[in-house]
Structure formats: C-alpha cells, structure tokens
Amino acid sequence: MRIGDRIKELRTIYGITQVQLAEKAGISRSVISQYESNLVEPTASVVAKLAVALNSSTDYLLGLEDDFGIRVDSKELIERPDYDLADKQLTDLMKLFKVMTEVQKAQVLGFAIGMLENIGVNVKAILGY
C-alpha cells in the first residue's frame, strides 16, 4: 500500500472529507487529492502534518509499520471536551488489535462483519470492497 492509499484509508476511517483533512493539515484540498491518487508524494514536513491530522504515526503513513500507529495519551483523551464513549471504544479496540495474532484479528473482523450484515448494513460499501 502506497502513502496515498494510507492517507485515504485513515481519512475514510475517521469519516472526514478531503477538505476537512486539508484544513487540519494546513494544505490545499487539491494536494490531498493528488496524494490520495498517488500522483504526488508529500514532503517529510507534510507527512508529519498529515500524521498529526490523522492521529497516526509517520511510520504508518510511510509503510514502515503495519498498524495505524494511532497515538493516544489516555489522560489527554479523557480530558478532551469532545471525548465520548465511541472515542474510548475505538482506542480500546486498537490497543487490543495490537496484541492479537493475525488469526484472532480475522476472527474479530469476521464476527463484526457478520453481525452488521445480519442487521442489513452494507459492510462492503463501508469497507470499499
């Protein structure tokens, strides 16, 4: 997976638009589009800005680590004014995924997909399949 694919993946997971990501990172939307299309690669300083905006690590964006590299300070998370249960659940899930084997991760994802499909959610559309 190339850096543009990783940027788009994280942006989609967080449910933000290219415009919102551009505003958070302090760059233009058209540049985000070029990155996500893998037409242009960001400079080191822009990779750092994107990592902060996407709550990830530069290593993940650069393909040097396999997980999302999400950086979370529990104290900071709880003190955030926009903190809600979903934030904590996502953080907890990411922590658990980091210690699971690949088989365990596949089992958890399979369960979640099956559960959502049983209630009529179009999982393929969400996951981009």
Image (cartoon, grey):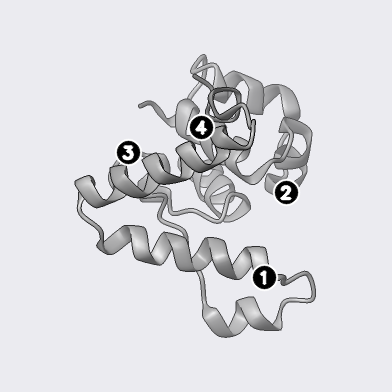
Q: Residue at 63% across / 65% down in the picture?
A: 87
Residue at numbered disc 2: 24
Q: Earlier in the sequence, mark 1 or mark 2?
A: 2
Which amino acid type is marked by label 4? Pro
Q: Nearer the viewer, residue 102 or 22?
A: 102
Q: CA distance from mark 4 to mark 1?
A: 34 Å
Which one is closest to the eye, mark 3 or mark 4?
A: 3
Which one is closest to the eye, mark 2 or mark 4?
A: 2
Q: CA distance from mark 1 to mark 3?
A: 30 Å
At mark 2, the secondary structure is helix
Which amino acid type is marked by label 1? Leu
Q: Nearer the viewer, residue 107 or 19?
A: 107
* Location of residue 69 in the rendering, given as x and y in whole percent from the top left corner: 40, 55
Confirm whether residue 63 shows in the render. Answer: yes
Residue at numbered disc 1: 85
Residue at numbered disc 3: 63
Which amino acid type is marked by label 2? Lys
Residue at numbered disc 4: 42
